[in-house]
Amino acid sequence: MTYYTKLPAVLLLEDGTVYHGKAAGKIGTTTGEICFNTGMTGYQEVFTDPSYFGQIMVTTNAHIGNYGVHDEEIESGDIKISGLVCKNFNIAFSRKQSEKSIQDYFQEENIVGISDVDTRSLVRHIRDKGAMNAIISSEILDLEELKAKLAEVPSMDGLELSSQVSTKEAYFYGNEQGKHRVAVLDLGVKKNILRNFDDRDVYVKVFPAKTPFEEMEKWGADGYFISNGPGDPAAMPYAVETVKKALAADKPLFGICLGHQLLALANDIKTVKMFNGHRGLNHPVKNIIIDHCEVTSQNHGFGVVAEDVRNSDKVEITHLNLNDNSIEGIRVKNKKAFSVQYHPESSPGPHDSRYLFDQFVNFMDSEKQ
Amino acid sequence: MPKDTSIKSVLIIGSGPIIIGQAVEFDYSGSQAALSLKDEGIEVSIINSNPATIMTDNVIGDHVYLWPLTCESVEKILQERHIDAVLPTMGGQTALNLAKEAEERGIWKKYGVRIIGVDIAAIEKTENREEFRQLMVDIGVGVAPSKIANSFLEGKEAAQEIGFPLVIRPSYTMGGSGGGFVHKKEDFDVALSRGLQASPTHEVLVEKAVIGWKEYELELLRDNKDNVIIICSIENFDPMGIHTGDSITVAPAMTLSDRCYQDMRNQAITMMRAIGNFAGGCNVQFSVNPADESIIAIEINPRVSRSSALASKATGYPIAKIAAKLAIGYNLDEIENQITKTTSAYFEPTLDYVIVKIPRWNFDKFKGANMELGLQMKAVGEVMAIGRTFIEALQKACQSLEIGRAGLGADGRQNRNLDEIMYGLEHPSWNRLFLVKDAMTLGVPMESIRKVTKIDKWFLLQIQELVQLEQELKRYSLNNIPKEFFFTLKQKGFSDVQISWLLGNGTTEDEVYERRKELGIKRVYKMVDTCAAEFPAQTPYYYSTFEDENESTPSDRKKIIVLGSGPNRIGQGIEFDYSCVHGLLAAKESGFESIMINCNPETVSTDFNMADKLYFEPVFWEHVREIIELEKPEGVIVQLGGQTALKMAEKLHQYGIKIIGTSYDNMDIAEDRGRFSDLLKDLGIPYPNYGVAEDAEEALVVAKKVGYPVLVRPSYVLGGQGMSIVINDEDLETAVVKLLGDLPGNRVLIDHFLDRAEEAESDSICDGEDVHIVGLMEHIEPAGIHSGDSSAVLPPFNLSDNVIRQMEEYSIKLAKALNVIGLLNIQFAIKDEKVYVIEANPRASRTVPFIAKAYDVPYINIAAKVMLGVNKLKDFKIERKLVGYAIKEPVFSFDKFPEVEKQLGPEMKSTGEAIRFIKDLEDPYFVKLYKEKSMYLSK
């Protein structure tokens, strides 16, 4: 297939900016909040990460799809992004382990994308203008019609999305004989988090987002895990309530990303929608407790209010972002509860922060001694 | 930990003369490190015997020692100056070896000098093949099955155990010296003895060959707190079996999944931690089995390397600069990102473009050399290109090579001989990439190409797409190419020359150019910013592509463009980069915005801190032209970038773009043998009899007229390419036929060769009124050996006053007659006290940087300011500081081509040079050189 046979597609941003490109994936129309990810590997893991639910993803890497799609490298059952914007959408791949091309994958999963876009210019635009909604279409090229459709898309601010990606039924993961039991509150949990527990001989039960704490407690967990997920944490009072109760239960507690924001909210620290989120595999974080740095995988559009954390008498800062000094990790004073804004399970991304899972397991070990 | 304040004075060891496997990249790293330390208020001393480097210039070091890289020199420096620490990681294997030797001899300890940036034990672990292998096994990193051998017998036993094909890797050598693949038992004995001999410890590793596996490199940086970051992943287009320096490489890795990449990243970090605790840079090479993505470690180099220079240019992350700061105690989180200036240096760069590096070979200079690529590096230089797709970068890299190609094929220079193509695919040499394309054009199935070359299918598919686009283009003529398709072609890296060739019917490059301008298809420039535009960046480092937005906004300042010298090669080496850098600095000092165009990732000129604005682009007309159209400079400096830049002069002139300094017409007089000889005649300056011939028959007539022996050469070439001295009709015929075969359409110049003459040269600066003689150098070897291969002495040691007077007189006369504004180099032959002018080059020569160092006068800076018209010669007070003599000593890389005999002639073969100062002519070094002066002279 040469370039010439590709169909045209259009990307329209909320502020009226238009980019023209070629259709990628399914022919159709899609909407969502536009955000960009700067990772150079792991597109499949990113697309299937539930935290990206409802978002149109701009990938900055020059090529996407270049090593195909492999059934095992998923972070959830299906593609979670609502659309893709990229420069080169590579249908051809060479990797022996891959079963199919990204084009086939997108078509199977009904994902609409646009390629051959000046993504660099687009990223510079979003960087300056901030997060906003967008629409991609390869079937409607009339801008007025697209504008009308885009106007109907709600803002991510104040949007609760976790319940849409969370499991409907509780399920188990790992070895039943494992040395610890962790109750996972699934707000959009990534598979690799569960794999990391399993690797450490931890047996988990994954609960739907709106499970009352009492039900989780009944299972007899040694620790609680509050997962990552999409949407605005401030719109999730039910989850904040769950976290508060889990804290009161005084068991080891670990939160990642959205889980971190909820732990903050449970300690009266506000969260805020960021001008531009952090999304990529190269974010520098310093663990100020042990004075060591880690390259982290990140994906968040909301953050905790730094001032609130600094003024809090309940929590203390454990990790800081070296680029913008934002809060990357906190722990609750006098408790074995901690959380990080980034993704230590890092799939995709560097494995520098996997020690946090060990730390959580160590807390549970010490509880049992 | 912040800066270690006990370090106040640091010695940086350079890498010495340029040889294959250890080249200009260490001038870049050395210079960066020195500037980085000076920024911290540290006094920097530098030792390097290579006078053509920027690192040995006063603008870089506080104290420069142009001395031989020996323990004796080191000790002398330490006696003379208090040094707190030595940084040996910036000068390649040479510097590490010297540091190690000095350590063994207790020199560092004796003078209380700390070694920073590496620890000697770490070097040991990585250089000793067996120790490395054992360490990898201990830490659970995969390695290829292997056995160490210290004798012929042990080697044979090892081979028996491991089986063929296998690899022989000598310990403690660089650039894969003495190593190689052995496919058959019959070839083993010879390869083994060669390996054992090449290793200074007579030790080799016999290793199972993983031919055809994918090859990768990671560049790491670590600080004192053991914080590690990966700066860049590099994937080799050529799979295992070809030295990485001889491989086409791509960044970021193109065909790696996150799972496999993170596995590699983890292993690299484990490896770096296992070899020691030093803070600094490190390069790790891996091989991946495409069948199951299993990884084995190939090697680890605990120092900056050619790859780290490439990684720095590829990502914008200046590895050597940061490594130097880490060596004096800083941690990564205490340093800012050098490009954004707002974010942290502790991060991993991310790319939103693709870079391709292609090596540049010079097999034409080594007649009879084994041209097949293997474990031992044979390339003399490299180019890098940046694009928004792999294929765009690949085509731009082809345009950068200066081998007469307008991109990857489609330029009328394709090979159509299927047998030759298939042979070339199986036996990789300099042209394999082009043959892959030629094979596809001829319809060879991609799978057949993949089977023979083992090149990853993804890369082949990208090239295949070019063939499809070419087929499509042939359906159109210039006037009816749809705009969108035209745009696609340009996005895929096709040059206007290629498009014109594909369209045929006499379509010219200019017509293609005009048509696409009409359609509004023009280049835009994007910034290299380390972060894929996530943060605003402050550093003006650009590349071109075809997209919507242009990020390079010209300022309203007056601008000067300096054209670079492209890839390093024999005849055009580091000295031209030295000149370009000084050109940039002089333009800055004179109030201009200085803009650099170059495509060589190894150099200092492509360090984004040197120019006010860097365009990392091919020095290829189409690219140069569009940058000029965007920037609208006051003029373009072509005198400093060697033949590469000079070759652009005609085009610039033709398109009415101002050339800074000497005019195109005057340059042409100097280059055009006929016009030049007429000028010499008018000026009453003697020159050897000469004639011009268009074919062999004519050549015989001319030779008879001028008299044998004759010097035969094409016009407009570099480093005496294709030149030979012949003594009879038969040889002449052969030489002319060969020459015209290699360079069709060229004319042959036939000069009477002044047998047993002496050779000398002059460099001068002329400002239009006055002429300043920069220096006169006398060659030790007789005429007939290319000036670049001659040992030359500054000032002359054996020429009479009468001869010197004639040389000076002719230099002045010629400079004025050619209206030189800037530099002029003249080559002389001297016979019976009579001086003949052999040639004149109105540009920076190989010798000006040498003389600048020897006399300690910033000649290029002066020449550049004169060229720019901001100064006259009389504005400068020039004081020469040389005591005794300085000898320029050529250095060869013949050891990389054991099958080639060392013979010197009119075609240049040396890859580098060293400087040596002597007090007087009794110096034993000089006496020996003088005695052996005719030894290697050949025809």
Image (tube, grey):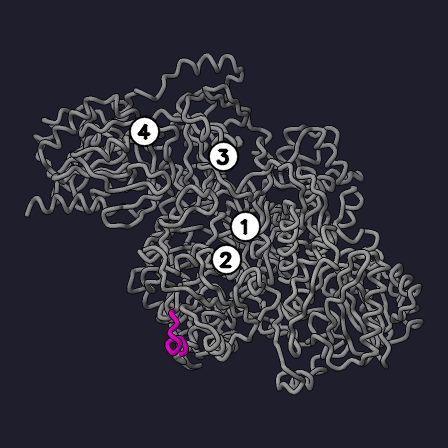
- The residue beneath circle 4 is A302
What residue would you read off at disc 3?
A89
Q: Residues within 10 Å of mark 4 (few under 14, many from 20)?
A: many
Mark 1 and mark 2 in contact (Cβ < 8 Å)?
yes
In reply to whether residue B109 is colored magenta, the answer given is yes
Please identify the quarter of the rendering in which residue B764 is found.
bottom right
Residue indicated by mark 1: B609
Measure how far apart labels 2 and 1 are at the Cα level: 10 Å
- For disc 4, the chain is A
SS for callout 1 = loop
**In the image, which is nearer the foreground, mark 1 or mark 3?**
1
Residue B80: where, in percent of width, then height? 48, 76
* Residue type indicated by callout 2: Leu
Look at label 1 and name its amino acid.
Asn
Q: Position of residue A7 (x, y in %)?
A: 55, 25
Relative to B577, say whether B810 is above or below.
below
As shown in the figure, which amino acid type bears the numbered disc 4?
Phe
Q: Is residue A110 visible?
A: no
